[in-house]
Amino acid sequence: NAGVMQNPRHLVRRRGQEARLRCSPMKGHSHVYWYRQLPEEGLKFMVYLQKENIIDESGMPKERFSAEFPKEGPSILRIQQVVRGDSAAYFCASSQSPGTGVQPQHFGDGTRLSIL
Amino acid sequence: SQQGEEDPQALSIQEGENATMNCSYKTSINNLQWYRQNSGRGLVHLILIRSNEREKHSGRLRVTLDTSKKSSSLLITASRAADTASYFCATEPGGTYKYIFGTGTRLKVLA
């Protein structure tokens, strides 16, 4: 499967625990984006990363959320001390170029995070 | 209304009928894209239309763009049960990489 791979597909955490969401971009893509989707809503931009660099994290909550895209390995979205409001579907997308639109962003199937 | 707002929110039609969804946005854009999302899945890219284009076709899909009205429409002709999904428009205000999605149109095609 050459598409964007996200894991796990479903993640259950208790309040106060940490959640780690992984995303492997499509082969040849070096730009990764994370979005959050609440039920019955559209996707909301969180962060844009290139290898080893955070380009724009303006959509990320200031606390408890962080993201990285190391030189080797998948991109990670980390949520510390989760709260019930963090329950959502988190989608990763990747592209060849920085979102010029000529190369659209390709999305993974998401991680559905549930907080007990 | 927010950037990239679709209407109707929900649409139910019979197989074989055409389905039309609309999207309105606020700021200037370089392009507009339509995506489909099946239940529990990620988004699948359907079609991209640039700001200097007025209409674009792809198979049973027809997209129009009116930049003066800041609106776009997606027409699915001869709908099939497999077209049942949510459809989102996405814009890139100012040509940034930040896609802004609307709340989507939930289409149900009845067999």
Image (cartoon, rainbow, N blue to C red):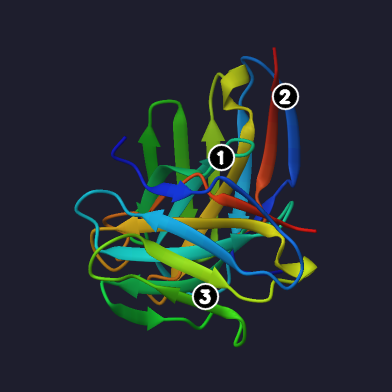
- Compare residues A4 and B7 and report the one nearer the observer: A4
Residue A54 falls in image quadrant: bottom left
The image quadrant where one finds the C terminus of chain A is bottom right
Is B8 rendered above or below residue B39?
A: below
Q: Amino acid at mark 3?
A: Thr
Residue at far bottom of view: A62
Is residue B68 shown left or right of residue A25? right
Is B33 rendered above or below residue A53?
A: above
Q: Are marks 3 and 1 in contact (CB under 8 Å)?
A: no
Q: Are marks 3 and 1 on the same chain?
A: yes
Q: Amino acid at mark 2?
A: Ile
Q: Is residue B100 visible?
A: no
The residue that disc 1 covers is B41
Chain of the residue that carries numbered disc 2 in the rendered image: B
The image quadrant where one finds the N terminus of chain A is top left
Q: Residue at x 29, y 72 (%)?
A: A50
Q: Are marks 2 and 1 on the same chain?
A: yes
Q: Earlier in the sequence, mark 2 or mark 1?
A: 2
Give me the C-alpha separation between circle 3 and circle 1: 29 Å
Q: Are marks 2 and 1 in contact (CB under 8 Å)?
A: no
